Amino acid sequence: MKKVILTAVAIAAFILSATAADNVANKTVSVQSKARIITPITLANTSSQALDFGVIARGATDATVVVSSSAAPSINVLTGDAVVLSSAPQTAAKFTVGGENAKTYAITIPSTTQTITSGANSLNITGFTCSNGATGTIGTNDVFYVGGTLSVPAAAVAASYTGTFSVTVAYN
C-alpha cells in the first residue's frame, strides 16, 4: 500500500510541476488598441485665382518678371527692360487648406522649371515661393499664396500663354 501511495504522490507531484511549468512559460496580457480618425486634408485654388504675371510688353533685352507670394503683389520687373502694364494687375495663386483644426501640414511647390505655352511658343516659370514657407496650420494659416519668376526673352512671340503647375499639401 505504501508503494501505491508513493506512486500516487509521485504522479500528482509530476502533474503539478508540469502545470506550474506551463503557467510560467505561457503568460497572456491584454493590451488596449486605439485609432483616431480625422478629417481628410483638402486643398482648393481659392476663387480660381491663378498665378498671373499680367500683361507684359517685352523689351529689347531678355527680362524676368516676378510675382511675389502675397495677397497683393506689386509689379516687379527683376531684370531687362520689359514693362508690366498696371491696367492688368498681377496675382499670386491663392490656396485654401481644410481639414482637422490645429493640425500642421507640409506644402510642396514646384522646385523645377514649369512651362506655359501658346501653340509652339513657350515661356518658363522658376523660383516658386510660398507665403507660408513650407508649412501651415489648419485654423490659423489655412490660406496661402504662391508666386514665381517668369523669363521673358526679347524674342518672345506676342500671344497669351497658359499652363499649370501642381501644389501639394499633406498632414505632418
Image (cartoon, grey):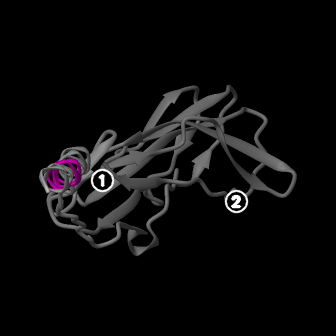
Residue 27 locus on image (x, y percent): 21, 52
Q: On residue 72, which mark appears? A: 1
Tags 1 and 2 touching, CB below 8 Å: no
Q: Decide which of 83, 20 is in the foreground and name it.
A: 20
Residue 108 seen in this snapshot: yes
Q: Residue at x 34, y 40 (%)?
A: 134
Q: Secondary structure at mark 1?
A: loop
Q: Which residues are magenta?
A: 8-16
Q: Earlier in the sequence, mark 1 or mark 2?
A: 1
Q: Decide which of 7, 86 is in the foreground and name it.
A: 7
Label count reads: 2
CA–CA distance between discs 1 and 2?
22 Å
Q: Decide which of 63, 15 is in the foreground and name it.
A: 15
Residue furthest to the right? 120
Which secondary structure class fits the magenta region best?
helix
Q: Left or right: where does residue 95 sit relative to residue 51?
A: left
- Specify the amino acid type for callout 2: Ser
Residue 101 locus on image (x, y percent): 16, 66
| Neighbour tally class for label 2: few under 14, some 14-19, many 20 plus, Cα within 10 Å | few
- Specify the amino acid type for callout 1: Ala
Q: Left or right: where does residue 158 sit relative to residue 1?
A: right
| Neighbour tally class for label 1: few under 14, some 14-19, many 20 plus, Cα within 10 Å | few
Residue 105 locus on image (x, y percent): 30, 51
Residue 92 seen in this snapshot: no
Residue 70 locus on image (x, y percent): 31, 48
Residue named by callout 2: 160
Q: Does residue 134 belong to the magenta stretch?
A: no
Q: Left or right: where does residue 129 sit relative to residue 118?
A: left
Q: Residue at x 48, y 45 (%)?
A: 109
Indicate whether 78 appears above or below 89: above
Q: Decide which of 19, 163 is in the foreground and name it.
A: 19
